[in-house]
Image (tube, grey):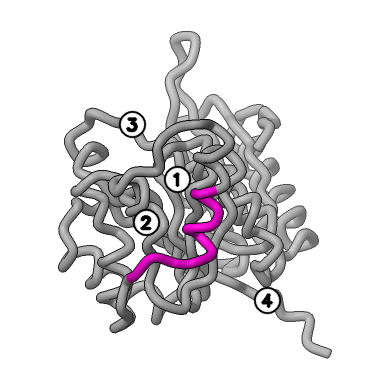
Amino acid sequence: MSDRAKTVTAAVIIIGDEILSGRTKDQNLGFLAEALNEVGVQLRECRMIADVEAEIVAAVNDLRGRFDYVFTTGGIGPTHDDITADSIGAAFGLKVDHNPEAVAVLEAHYAHTGAELNQARMRMARTPVGAALVENPVSKAPGFRVENVYVMAGIPAVCQAMFHSLKHELVGGDPVHSISIAVHLAEGTLANGLGALQEKYPDVSMGSYPFYRDGRFGASIVARSQTPDRLMAAANEIRQLMRDLNGEPIEEND
């Protein structure tokens, strides 16, 4: 049996003019990156795009062929500018219509709340024909999945709830483990030694992140790998590199 780590990848498409204008601050990307890694899926790319069907279609069709999973957030509400469902339908060449299962969910929800299930709210029951629904425990209007593309709401609480509803469907690989070590040394001081260690450990990603704390410059070195033994070995050499340069390693929670 091969001991090579299994890698499963994903991309996220964040849809919405309000994100690009700065009016709304995205809170979904960080959540998805961490939640995906917990189930063994590595987030490899993110795109933020406008409410423009052609751009959504192009992004979906590019990413769904290059990654194991694609997740979209935003644009599945009741208003005219919520065009994600139609765009996903166009990307797959599928007709978009009221999903009977989604209609039943909304009818039950609005009967319970006493609010009117009007034409605008019925838009939230539209999916590409044949799509599987993604449960929404918060506000009930469901997301959906077509092949490897999951379509979720943009509201952070709803997006998170939808992800927790669907994550059991994801088939992940080996999770990525990380170790973060800080030191009060300049990046330029660390650069040569760190570069040599990266060549020695090609299966361990090493990132350098400068900081300025309490009047002192320094850098945090974050090492990431799917292979715990290799990660630990690389981290030990990073610590020794810091000591050899007269720096004291500072363990950080990562």
Q: Nearer the viewer, residue 124 or 67?
A: 124
Residue 29's disc is 1
Mark-to-mark CA distance, 2 and 3: 15 Å
Mark-to-mark CA distance, 1 and 4: 23 Å
Residue mark closest to the camera, 4 vs 2:
2
Q: Nearer the viewer, residue 113 or 133?
A: 113
Amino acid at circle 4: Lys
Mark-to-mark CA distance, 3 and 4: 34 Å
Instruction: Quadrant for residue 230, please give it.
Output: bottom right
Check disc 3 and report the residue beneath it.
Answer: 25
Residue at the top extreme of this rendering: 214
Residue mark closest to the camera, 1 vs 4:
1
Per the image, label 3 sits on a secondary structure element best described as: loop
Q: Residues within 10 Å of mark 4 (few under 14, many from 20)?
A: few
Per the image, label 4 sits on a secondary structure element best described as: loop
Check disc 4 and report the residue beneath it.
Answer: 6
Callout 1 touching callout 4 (CB < 8 Å): no
Q: Position of residue 228 (x, y in %)?
A: 77, 59
Q: Tell me which numbered mark, 2 or 3, is placed earlier along the sequence.
A: 3
Which span of residues is magenta-colored? 97-107
